[in-house]
Amino acid sequence: MGRLLCLPGDRDHGRAVWLSLVLLAAIASTQLDRRPAHAQAPAPAPAAAQPAPAPAPVQAPAAAPAQPVAAPAPAAEGEPSKEQAGAPAAPAETTPPKPESMLMWAIRASGVIGLFLLCLSVYFTALVIRLFMEFRVGEAVPPQLVDRLETAIKDKKFQEAYDACKESDSFLARLVRTGIAGIPNGRAEARESMQAMSDEIVSAMEMKISYLAIIGTLGPMIGLVGTIWGMILSFQEIATAAGAQPRPEKVAEGISTALFITLEGISLAVPAIFFFAFFRNRIAQITLEANKVADRTINALMAAAKPSKAA
């Protein structure tokens, strides 16, 4: 390189310069070729993050050839299989409770007060049957006794008429017997004795039907007691709920107790009042009929006794 620079003349000097430039360019290109590849290539632009590829499924090793398995023996008839035995039992269907009958509900709701009303109604029924058997016109004025008295008076057998009345305990027999006993003291005395006996008998009969009036009065009062008691039970359930929701069935029990006992009390009182009025009218009818027959008998007896005294 030093020799080229020392060549004489301008031409040589130009050639030297030109050769120098060629050599420098060759050296530069050589140096550029020796650089690493990563230095030569420009840095790539950052690419967007790509999702990592899913790992390839690992292939399971081939299973060994299955050996033939003997089929399970069929379960005996009536015996559950293993699958059935291992399976959880299905929940049993819950059947709704059988509805309570109206009669049983009324008995349970009525309680002790209802039992007392039941006993009172039994007594009331027995009393009404007894009064129907006793308070009859045929019992108060027996036709057989009337025939015997008429026959004895017609035959003027006054002692026989008195004995016939003494043997009977009917309304008519007691009146006639009292009248015959008072005849010696006069007609007026005999009638007064018969009227006193009639009042006594009527008082005894009215005393018997007075129990119907008592039942008719007590029935609504006992029903009112049941009403109050049932309301107390219902409000007790509401008051003692302590902020919780009161149980509707308990509240309904108290209300049903109140209603049932009220119904039973009124159901007992209404027929009692009716039969009290019925038998009071029956007593008036019996009294009227017995007094009428007794007066006629005493008048006939006194009329039959006068001719015998004149004789």
Image (cartoon, rainbow, N blue to C red):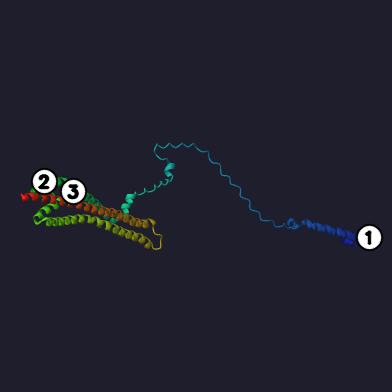
* Amino acid tagged 1: Arg
Front position in the image: 113 or 173: 173
Which is in the foreground here, disc 1 or disc 2? 2
Front position in the image: 293 or 202: 293
Residue at image mark 2: 154
* Amino acid tagged 2: Lys
Residue at image mark 3: 139
Can residue 170 be seen by looking at this rendering? no
Q: Is residue 90 left or right of residue 220?
A: right
CA–CA distance in space, label 2 to label 3: 24 Å
Which is in the foreground here, disc 3 or disc 1? 3
Callout 1 secondary element: helix
CA–CA distance in space, label 1 to label 2: 211 Å
Q: Is residue 82 left or right of residue 113?
A: right
The residue at the point 27 percent across, 58 percent down is 217
* Amino acid tagged 3: Glu
Q: Position of residue 240 (x, y in %)?
A: 37, 62
The residue at the point 88 percent across, 58 percent down is 19
Assess disc 3: are there few (<14), some (14-19) or many (≥20) residues with their C-alpha within 10 Å of its C-alpha: some
The numbered dot on residue 107 is: none
Residue at image mark 1: 11
Disc on the earlier residue, 1 or 2:
1
Q: Quadrant of the N terminus?
A: bottom right
